[in-house]
Image (cartoon, rainbow, N blue to C red):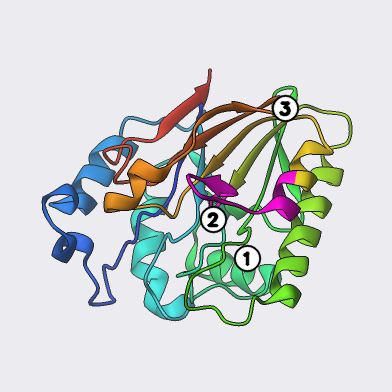
Amino acid sequence: MALYAIGDLHLSLTADKSMEVFGPAWENYVDRIGASLSQLTADDVLVLAGDTSWGIDLNEAEADFRFLDQFPCKKYLVKGNHDYWWSTVSKMKSFFAEKGFTTLDFLHNNCAFYGDHALCGTRGWFFEEDQKPHNAKVLNREVGRLETSLQAAGERPVWCFLHYPPLYQGYECPEILRTLAGHPVELCCYGHLHGHAIRLRMEGERGGTAFALISADHLGFVPKKICE
């Protein structure tokens, strides 16, 4: 039994948006993802930290979910900025039940438990250069969702999973960092950074929390093992 995490799979088994156009780092990425996930067992847990599927709705993403569901490990999905298929949790759970997907669940305004730890997560916030003006409403909503998830953990130590990085070289989101600092967050994993942006990542400990980038191309499409 082990806990793993990876983000940014960008599956597109139905949508015509293969990431292979971005160069050798993404060559045969679906096969590489499949080879990695086939090593996980039904006792393992995998957190998918956003940008899981390019599908524009649940129906277009169905093939990607079916691909993931074939691997028996339990999977918790976090929303990413390109998860256009994302809907209400009740609608997504109903869709999964209708299609017979049994290994997929969500981290969204809630937490899950792994041993003595809580698994918390949300999309987070990231100020893109083309987002003008800064969207305070979206930021506050994400801070609220993160706080709700962390409060659900109670007194348990937390492993947190965000899609957007709360910090990297030359950037930080103080609202997200303050929220993390108010709880016993031992580890914060994040995705979103690809290609040349990977070199801007900030990892290691800050304020008692360890930070780690888990975007799929950074990990070579092999999920990061968090613990046994």
Neighbor class of circle 3 (other Cα within 10 Å; few <14, some 14-19, many 20+) is some
**Magenta segment:** 162-177
Q: Amino acid at mark 1?
A: Lys
> What x and y, as percent, mark residue 93?
63, 65
Pick whichever, 15 or 23, lies toward us: 23
Q: CA separation, marks 1 and 2?
A: 24 Å
**Residue hosting label 2:** 164
Q: Amino acid at mark 2?
A: Tyr
Task: For mark 1, give the secondary structure.
Answer: helix
Pick whichever, 159 or 13, lies toward us: 159
Q: CA separation, marks 1 and 3?
A: 24 Å
Given contact means CB atoms under 8 Å apart, are the residues at marks 1 and 3 in contact?
no
Neighbor class of circle 1 (other Cα within 10 Å; few <14, some 14-19, many 20+) is some
Q: Nearer the viewer, mark 2 or mark 3?
A: 2
Give the residue displayed 54% in from the left and 55% down from the top: 164
**Residue hosting label 1:** 93
State whether residue 1 appears in this view: no
> What x and y, as percent, mark residue 200?
40, 44
**Residue hosting label 3:** 117
Image side of residue 211 versus residue 68, left or right? right
Given contact means CB atoms under 8 Å apart, are the residues at marks 1 and 2 in contact?
no
